[in-house]
Image (cartoon, rainbow, N blue to C red):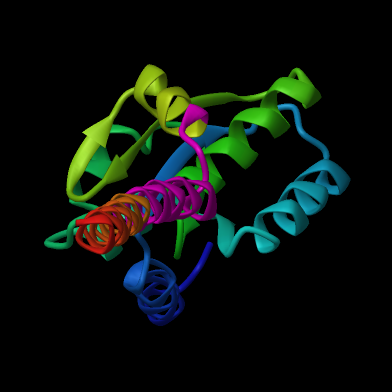
C-alpha cells in the first residue's frame, strides 16, 4: 500500500498528465495483457495521446475542480485513462479501433470541454474526420470560392475588352 506521501506524488503526476489535455477517454481494459497495453500506448503516442492506469480515487482527486471533473462518474472499477493533447478525435479513434481489434475491453465514456460523454458519443467522436482532414476540407472550400471569384472577374474584363473592340470596329466603319 502506498504511503500518504507517495499518493500525493501520484496525484501531482496525474495533475500534470491532465494539464494540457483536450479530451479524456475512460476505458475498461480488463483482459488485456501487458504486451497489448504496451502496444496500445505506442499507438496513442503516434496521435499525441497518453494512457495511464491509476487508482480511481487518485484520478478523482487530481481532476477535482478542473474541466475533467466529470470523470468521477466514469472512473469506476479497473480504468485506463486516455488523454488526448491535440486532436480530440484521434485518441478516440485509436481507442475504439484498438478495443475492436483486440475484442477485449470496453469504452465507458469520456470528457470533452468539461462535459461527460457516454460510450456512443465517444464512438461518434471517433467517426469524425481528423483535424488535418477538416482543415483540408475548409481550405479546398475557400480555394474554390476564390477561384470562382477570379473567373468572374476575368469574364467581366474579357467582356469589356470585346465590347471595346466592337465599338472600335464600328467607329472605323462609320
Horizontal side of residue 110 vs 43, given as left or right: left
Give the total of numbered labels.
0
What residue lies at 39% left-to-right and 17% top-to-bottom? 120
What residue lies at 44% left-to-right and 73% top-to-bottom? 10
Q: Which residues are magenta?
A: 127-150
Residue 118, picture quadrant: top left
Residue 80 shows in the view: no
> What percent of the width, then of the height, locates residue 29?
64, 33
Residue 59, picture quadrant: bottom left
> What percent of the width, then of the height, locates residue 116?
23, 35
What residue lies at 74% left-to-right and 27% top-to-bottom? 31
Is 62 drawn above or below residue 39 in the view shown? below
> What percent of the width, then of the height, locates residue 93?
58, 37
Residue 147, picture quadrant: bottom left
Horizontal side of residue 68 vs 144, given as left or right: left
Question: In front: 154, or 61?
Answer: 154
Horizontal side of residue 116 vs 99, given as left or right: left
Taking the magenta stretch, the answer to whether it contains residue 140 is yes
What residue lies at 32% left-to-right and 54% top-to-bottom? 162
Amino acid at each position: 500500500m502506498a504511503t500518504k506521501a507517495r499518493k500525493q506524488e501520484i496525484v501531482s503526476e496525474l495533475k500534470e498528465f491532465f494539464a494540457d489535455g483536450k479530451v479524456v477517454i475512460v476505458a475498461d481494459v480488463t483482459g488485456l495483457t501487458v504486451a497489448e497495453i504496451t502496444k496500445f500506448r505506442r499507438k496513442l503516442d503516434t496521435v499525441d495521446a497518453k494512457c495511464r492506469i491509476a487508482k480511481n480515487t487518485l484520478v478523482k482527486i487530481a481532476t477535482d475542480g478542473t474541466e475533467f471533473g466529470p470523470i468521477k462518474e466514469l472512473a469506476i472499477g479497473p480504468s485506463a485513462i486516455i488523454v488526448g493533447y491535440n486532436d480530440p478525435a484521434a485518441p478516440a479513434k485509436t481507442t475504439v479501433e484498438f478495443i475492436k481489434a483486440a475484442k477485449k475491453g470496453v469504452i465507458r465514456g469520456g470528457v470533452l470541454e468539461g462535459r461527460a460523454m457516454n460510450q456512443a458519443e465517444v464512438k461518434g467522436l471517433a467517426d469524425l474526420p481528423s483535424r488535418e482532414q477538416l482543415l483540408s476540407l475548409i481550405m479546398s472550400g475557400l480555394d474554390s470560392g476564390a477561384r470562382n471569384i477570379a473567373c468572374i472577374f476575368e469574364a467581366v474584363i474579357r467582356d469589356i475588352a470585346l465590347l471595346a473592340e466592337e465599338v472600335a470596329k464600328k467607329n472605323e466603319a462609320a
